[in-house]
Amino acid sequence: MLEIHAFIDVEDVEAGAAFYTQALGLTVRRRMTARWIELEGGAIPVHVLGGRPAEFEAGEALLRRDFGRHWTPVHLDFIVEDLPPAVERAVAAGGLLEGEADHPGYFKMASFSDPFGNGFDLIELYPGGYEAIAADQA
């Protein structure tokens, strides 16, 4: 199976790690470098990269990033058991609630930006969830 990791660029790595641990209940697994913290507690590891530098040191390698096509922003969906308390926790941690939607029979969603401008959604699936959407489209 292909292993997938999520990387989130923020200005301040400590503030970024604090936000995602407080907002989502993730925990620090390890500190890779002064600008790179790996979080765990989800289905995939979440890496927080601080400073958004054009050059990023990864061990002995120096990566050059131009934030063009490859480094474009993405958003992550975090599936939660109960949306209202998850929204409260994300707001208390500094997330900005940008909108909410309810798709009866499928899912309820709250759209956020983190304190660094990255988008993410909190989603509570109804019974059947994504499978129900796919079945209805078939």
Image: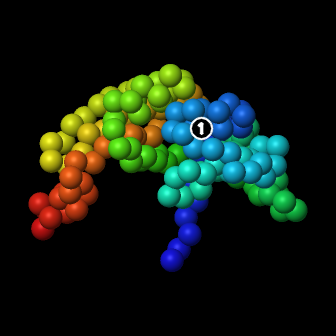
Picture coordinates of residue 117 (x, y %)?
54, 32
Image location (x, y in percent) of residue 41: 56, 50
- Report the coloring of the rendering: rainbow
Front residue of 82/106: it is 82
- Whether residue 34 is visible here, answered yes or no, is yes
Q: Residue 85 is drawn in which quadrant? A: top left
Residue 82's place in the image compared with 89, above or below, is: below
**Which quadrant would the C terminus be assigned to in this image?**
bottom left
111 relative to 138, above or below: above
Q: Residues within 10 Å of mark 1 (few under 14, many from 20)?
A: some
Residue furthest to the right in view is 60
What residue do we see at 72% from left, 34% from top?
Answer: 14
Residue found at x 50% / y 22%: 92
Q: Nearer the viewer, residue 129 or 2?
A: 129
| Residue 66 visible here | no
- SS class of the residue under badge 1? helix
Name the spot of residue 87 as percent of width and height, x first: 40, 30
Label 1 is placed on what type of residue?
Answer: Thr
**Residue placed most toward the observer, 56 or 137:** 137
Horizontal relation, residue 72 to residue 17: left or right: left
Identify the residue shown where x is 59% and y is 38%. Answer: 21
Side (left or right) of 106 relative to 70 = left
Q: Looking at the image, how many numbered discs can be counted on the residues?
A: 1
What residue is disc 1 on?
Answer: 21
Residue pictured at 75% horizontal, 55% vertical: 64
In the figure, is residue 60 to the left or right of 135? right
- Percent position of residue 88, x then y: 42, 25
